[in-house]
Image: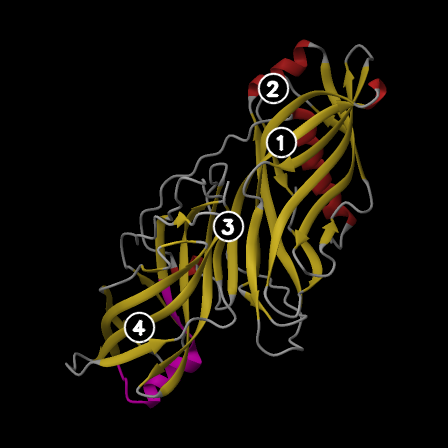
């Protein structure tokens, strides 16, 4: 959970404004039909993303016996960082949390018509779950947060950051011993007092729950027990706002590959925009998908020691996505993808966007009959390269990441 009362109050403020205004988030993303910027690619083993989750807030009046007065559809836009996978029983956090909500002018104008210009709020529940982990649910607002004198200005947009300053961490969770764990937004509860210019007060309770696609991400579990806590800081988070019901993110998966029988550690990053759910009779596809190859300096040095001096070029033959609960079961999204001439410099990482320009096609993936979710993970990869224009082709083969690295695990609705 949050380790700073100041940060928790910032989170409470945005949730209280959401409950008071009960607004529809108005945010759209510009298409990004180009290669990944190397500066935006996180380190190997890091998953970064931004999510716009549709929610519904049930508004009740406690002074009238808790009668519900209306339901209000809105959206929560959040972003954060987590590891790509976990060890058995490993402690972990969702870190670098932030976001924003913009409320349109018609809501503040409507409040002004009845004289509402201030609000007080108490937030006593904001739950983020991690399935099969311990604890399974963390209430970020375990200590109720009081926010007084929230200003409502008629006729003006209201944009509030989450949090107002800095970022927030959610955790620690302890992973299960095997399988996977899925982080989800569960619910938020706020108790609101609206105050008018003429002295009237109206008390409202807002219980906000997800309407579809509330899974933030799924983490596979495996490897050796006793791994150190995962609490990542300093990862790049430069995502433009995404429309409701979508996520945009970049995940850099660790791969163990082989070149001429020699093991190589590489990172394969995948970025794109993905729906948060799959229609029962529909499909899911990635938008503006692209990738990057990360060669850490230790591997660069090993390649140089193997005689791959100067630069290399080649072709990606496959990057397979593995689909559980959907079809096709496997899709190669990077066949015949050109690797441009790339220089190797000792003790220097290489981050190579692939494709250099344009996007990849990933999908459509259709849910199987009776499937509750469609989980898409990274599979095997292969490429051929040649050094310094030498026509000799060298083959690189990569096993699927272990533990499994999930791109998405979408509910079927």
Residue at left 40%, top 76%?
A: 348
Secondary-structure class at tag 2: helix
Q: Position of residue 255 (x, y in %)?
A: 43, 73
Q: Which residue is mark 1?
A: 56
User: In front of the other: label 3 or label 1?
Assistant: 3
Total count of labels: 4
Question: Which one is in front in this view, the residue at disc 3 or the one at disc 4?
Answer: 3
Residue 396 image position (x, y, % from top left): 30, 78
Say whether disc 2 or disc 4 marks the residue closer to the N-terminus.
2
The x and y percentages for residue 237 are 51, 53
Q: What distance separates the C-alpha of mark 2 from that of mark 3?
A: 36 Å
Camera-near label (2 vs 4) is: 4
Labels 4 and 1: the sequence-earlier one = 1
Q: Earlier in the sequence, mark 3 or mark 4?
A: 3
The range drawn in magenta is 292-310
- Which of the numbered marks, if any, corresponds to residue 107? 2
Location of residue 386 (image quadrant): bottom left
Residue behind mark 4: 382
Cβ atoms at labels 2 and 4 below 8 Å apart: no
């Amino acid at each position: 959970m949050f380790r700073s009362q100041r940060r928790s109050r910032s989170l409470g403020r945005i949730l209280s404004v959401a409950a008071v205004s009960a607004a529809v988030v108005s945010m759209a993303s510009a298409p990004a039909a180009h290669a990944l910027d190397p500066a935006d690619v996180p380190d190997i083993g890091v998953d970064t993303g931004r999510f716009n989750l549709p929610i519904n807030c049930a508004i009740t009046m406690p002074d009238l016996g808790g009668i519900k007065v209306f339901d209000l559809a809105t959206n929560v836009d959040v972003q954060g960082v987590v590891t790509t996978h976990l060890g058995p029983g490993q402690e972990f956090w969702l870190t670098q949390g932030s976001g924003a909500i913009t409320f349109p002018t018609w809501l503040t104008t409507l409040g002004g018509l009845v004289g509402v210009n201030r609000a007080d709020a108490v937030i006593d529940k904001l739950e983020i779950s991690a399935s099969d982990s311990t604890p399974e649910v963390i209430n970020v607002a375990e200590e109720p947060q009081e926010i007084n004198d929230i200003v409502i200005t008629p006729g003006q947009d209201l944009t509030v950051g989450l949090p107002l300053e800095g970022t927030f961490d959610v955790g620690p969770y302890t992973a299960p011993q095997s399988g996977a764990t899925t982080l989800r937004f569960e619910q938020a509860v706020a108790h609101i007092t609206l105050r008018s210019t003429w002295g009237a007060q109206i008390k409202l309770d807002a219980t906000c729950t997800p309407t579809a696609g509330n899974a933030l991400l799924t983490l596979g579990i495996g490897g050796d027990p006793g791994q150190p806590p995962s609490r990542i800081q300093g990862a790049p988070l430069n995502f433009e706002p995404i429309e409701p019901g979508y996520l945009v993110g970049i995940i850099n998966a660790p791969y163990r590959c082989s070149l001429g029988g020699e093991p190589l550690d590489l990172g394969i990053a995948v970025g794109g925009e993905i729906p948060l759910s799959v229609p029962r009779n529909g499909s899911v596809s990635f938008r503006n998908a692209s990738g990057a190859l990360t060669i850490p300096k230790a591997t660069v040095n090993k390649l140089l020691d193997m005689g791959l001096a100067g630069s290399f070029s080649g072709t990606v033959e496959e990057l397979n996505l593995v689909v559980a609960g959907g079809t096709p079961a496997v899709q190669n999204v990077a066949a015949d993808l050109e690797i441009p001439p790339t220089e190797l410099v000792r003790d220097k990482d290489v981050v190579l966007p692939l494709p250099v320009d344009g996007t990849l096609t990933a999908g459509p993936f259709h849910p199987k009959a009776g499937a509750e979710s469609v989980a898409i993970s990274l599979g095997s990869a292969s490429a051929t390269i040649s050094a310094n224009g030498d026509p000799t082709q060298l083959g690189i083969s990569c096993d699927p990441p272990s533990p499994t690295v999930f791109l998405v695990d979408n509910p079927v609705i």
